[in-house]
Amino acid sequence: MALDLAQVLQIHLAGDLALAEKAYRYLLQEPNPDTLVLVNLAVICSDSGRTEEASALLKRVLLTDPDCHDAYYNLGNILQNQKKHNEAVDFYRQAIRLNKTFFQAHYNLGNSLLSLGNIVEAVFHYEEALLYEPNHFNAHINLAMAMLLLGQFERGWNEYEYRFLAEPNIISPPSSLEKWDEDFLFRGTLLLVYEQGLGDTIQFSRYLSNLKNKGMKVALWLQKPLKKLFEGLDSEIFIYSAENYADLDLSNTRWFPLMSLPRLFKTNLQNIPSPTSLLVPLERQQYWKAVLGSRSKFRIALAWQGNPEQEKRKSRGRSFSLESLAVLAKLADVEFISLQKLAGSEQLDHCSFRNKFIHSQQEISQSMDFLDTAAIMQLCDLVITSDTSIAHLAGTLNIKTWLALKKIPEWRWLLETDKTPWYSSLTLFRQSEDDNWDEVFMKMALELKNTLSVSV
């Protein structure tokens, strides 16, 4: 019995893409194949990396059906994945012209506009997507990111609460605990639960003091690499990680997401709390001072690579190669320390300025504890980093830090300004165009030259 399109669509929806592709190709042999055959086959080709074939199929559709909004939309997706956002925008606009209620096209158009820096227009299209599909949770999240990037925090924080619907596993609270209802009269223990990255935990831990000032008993459940660093924070704030979670008294305890605290306290650009007062024990400082030796040159700590898994998603483009910093190494009176751990640290072995790193680099690289990282930072004159947890740690410790940012950074760094309300010791160096790190580090080299002249 011959296949018909309805049967093939069932195969496709069932997730058997290999069989669906064969079936679509069988239907292509018909004299006038249905437009949906070409479009769906193109989607399968695109998803498997065969973008040239996918584009050819979609353009074939437009030759016979110039009003096919799905063809324009999927051509836009291919271009967006190739970071050709200007071209993608044109195709998404065509799709929307043909179908005003096409919420996926509004959403993806918003994403390309956001990447191009057209933030206000991106907001408009996220709102359009939500007008036609209110439960498009990713549109809520990206709208939140855009609003926060613009400094419009009130709506941004509210929209950001949709993250739990967009990614149900983004946070893993203890199943035996109830979520706190935001009633400040609660007099049990409030367990703040971390979510996402180490930098997020460091940045938003500043709100623990706000809660204490409300008369609340506070505990923090965080990632293991941060535990020792935070244990010296405050004897009245209980610190837990997976290794000592069994010690937590669950009686009369509620949990709450750490990153929902800015919304709770109605944070805006004028009332951001000061960073957490983290202290590095004197003995830890003395240990690393002995390991590193005396400072005979201007000492710079470096970090260049973020979590590769995050690079595949919202943080794409935030990292740079170690070799990009070679222009800084040409300045004579500097020495480097690598703070890079795991992914990216292999670049150190083949770095053209490897001789500029201090003799004890191997011992530094072996420590995975952020308390050690903090102690090492305090023995440096400057930290230079990509947008990773290192920036948040350095900013919290009030260490002079230069942060290299992609053209459209994460929301917390806002737009254009070279300063941030979150950390007074950070200076931001921004790309003027996507992927152009050379300009960023040339500016840093000039600034470093001036700094060295002043220090001499």
Image (cartoon, helix red, strand yellow):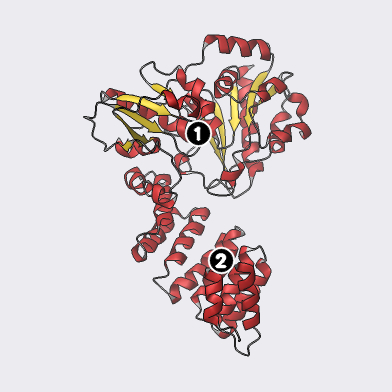
**Where residue 288 sits: x, y (%)?**
62, 14
Q: Amino acid at mark 1?
A: Gly
Q: Is residue 266 in sight in this rendering?
A: no
Q: Secondary structure at mark 1?
A: helix
Q: Secondary structure at mark 2?
A: loop
Q: Nearer the viewer, residue 107 or 31?
A: 31
Q: Is residue 434 in sight in this rendering?
A: yes
- Tell me which residue sits at (64%, 24%) in the image: 300
**Where residue 210 sits: x, y (%)?**
31, 27
- Tell me which residue sits at (44%, 74%) in the image: 97
| Residue 427, label in figure | none
Marks 1 and 2 sit apart, C-alpha to C-alpha, by 37 Å
- Tell me which residue sits at (63%, 71%) in the image: 19
Q: Is residue 331 above or below residue 164?
A: above
**Where residue 211 sits: x, y (%)?**
31, 27
- Residue 119 located left or right of residue 349: left
Label 1 vs 2, first from the N-terminus: 2
Q: Is residue 214 above or below residue 53?
A: above
- Tell me which residue sits at (65%, 75%) in the image: 22
Per the image, the residue denoted by label 1 is: 199
Q: Nearer the viewer, residue 116 or 82?
A: 82
Per the image, the residue denoted by label 2 is: 15
Seen as rendered, the residue at the extreme bottom is 31
Q: Amino acid at mark 2?
A: Gly
Seen as rendered, the residue at the extreme front is 1
Q: Nearer the viewer, residue 151 or 235?
A: 235
Q: Quadrant of the C terminus?
A: top right
Other-residue count near label 1 (Cα within 10 Å), few / some / many at <14 / 14–19 / ≥20: some
